[in-house]
Amino acid sequence: MPISKSKLWKIQKEKELMNKYGMTTKLPNYERKRSPSPNTYANRKAMKNEIKQRNMGKNTKQKEASRLSEFIKAKIKEGERKFKQEQDIYINLNYKQRRAILI
């Protein structure tokens, strides 16, 4: 089973420490999972909120485009509704009334 680059780096560092300080040295625990500092997490979260409030994020153009597409969709629906109303009126007319409209 091949060893990953990070594992090789850890082994190499341990060997360097052992060669430099001998057997009496305490090796660092590289297997320890690092937990995020609550302060940096809070700062990051505050910065993200500030960016969202000022519309400085990467999604601002998409938001504008979505607003435009909503406007276009509303116009299309309005046009379809008007067309359907006119179609219903036209269907209810008899032949002579239809001819009178076309002429």
Image: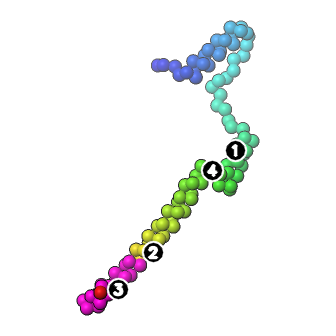
Q: Mark 2 is on which residue type? A: Glu
Instruction: Identify the residue shown where x is 63% and y is 25%.
Output: 31
Left or right of 82, for residue 26? right
Query: Quadrant of the rendered structure where residue 13 is?
Result: top right
* Position above or below: 87 against 38: below
Image location (x, y in percent) of residue 57: 63, 50
Q: Which badge, 4 or 3, is on the more N-terminal residue?
A: 4
Image location (x, y in percent) of residue 73: 46, 67
Q: Which badge, 3 or 2, is on the more N-terminal residue?
A: 2
101 part of magenta stretch: yes
Q: Which mark is residue 76?
A: none
**Mark 4–mark 2 distance (CA, rounded to whole Å):** 33 Å
Q: Is any atom of residue 38 visible in this view? A: no
Q: Which badge, 2 or 1, is on the more N-terminal residue?
A: 1
**Mark 1–mark 3 distance (CA, rounded to whole Å):** 60 Å
Check whether the beta carbons of the residues at disc 4 and disc 2 lie within 8 A of each other.
Answer: no
Q: Nearer the viewer, mark 2 or mark 1?
A: 2
Image location (x, y in percent) of residue 19: 68, 8
Pointer 3 residue = 89
Q: Residues within 10 Å of mark 2 (few under 14, many from 20)?
A: few
Pointer 1 residue = 44
Q: Is any atom of residue 27 visible in this view? A: yes
Q: Secondary structure at mark 2?
A: helix
**Mark 2–mark 1 distance (CA, rounded to whole Å):** 44 Å
**Mark 4–mark 1 distance (CA, rounded to whole Å):** 14 Å
Q: Which mark is residue 57?
A: 4
